[in-house]
Amino acid sequence: MNQHNTPVSIGLGELRIMQGDITACVTDAVVNAANAMLAGGGGVDGAIHAAAGPALPPACRAIIAARGRVEAGSAAITPGFGLAARFIIHAVGPIWHGGERGEAEELASAYRACLALCREQALESVAFPAISCGAYGYPVELAAPIALNELAKGVSEGWVKQAWMVLYSQDAYQTWLGIARQIL
């Protein structure tokens, strides 16, 4: 699955920076970079919806019916359906508006909300995409430190044993790995 896989030990756990396809990750959960209506879309969201299969959209609609929109900085959980992962955590990150509308806190909150769901469900491993860095336009050089710091904190505090940052392209992997080497 992965052409590149770089582990970083943190306390009793591990943070991995990986290149690969998040839909193929064999973890307790994968994180979907979702929209507020959990409606599927392009990029990671579309790939996860396609790989999970036809049972995912009704599960997402049930969440929306029960609680309404999933606001930026929040997350919801469904079964993994057709994925190797047992669960999908749908995280809604912020849309980038230049950094003056609380985007950094909303992004950090999205990662924390996912880790909190892992802790609540007693999940040991979770794979994350680069939330908000695709269609939502969050600059990678600003998003990566926020994401990596939140994941390292979650691992060090024992919320999960393994957190994987899964980047699809070689360029994205190299960028995130370079930032990880500077801050971790």
Image (cartoon, rainbow, N blue to C red):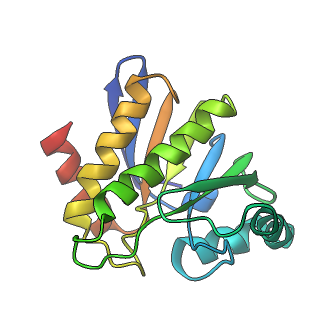
Q: Residue at x 40, y 78 (%)?
A: 136
How far from the left and from the top, in percent, is residue 35? Answer: 57, 74
Q: Nearer the viewer, residue 99 or 32?
A: 99
- Image check: 175 left or right of 18? left
- The residue furthest left is 182
- Image check: 30 left or right of 66? left
Q: Residue at x 80, y 72 (%)?
A: 57
Residue 90 in view, yes or no: yes
- Disc tally is 0
Q: Residue at x 19, y 63 (%)?
A: 141
| Viewport quadrant of the C terminus | top left
How far from the left and from the top, in percent, is residue 43? Answer: 52, 78
How far from the left and from the top, in percent, is residue 129? Answer: 46, 59
Q: Give the vertical position of 121 relative to 137 (above or below).
A: above
Q: Nearer the viewer, residue 150 or 177?
A: 150
- Image check: 60 left or right of 91? right
How far from the left and from the top, in percent, is residue 15? Answer: 39, 36
| Viewport quadrant of the N terminus | bottom right
Q: Residue at x 85, y 73 (%)?
A: 54
Using the rendered view, name the quadrant where residue 64 is placed: bottom right
Residue 25 in view, yes or no: no
Q: Nearer the viewer, residue 7 or 63?
A: 63
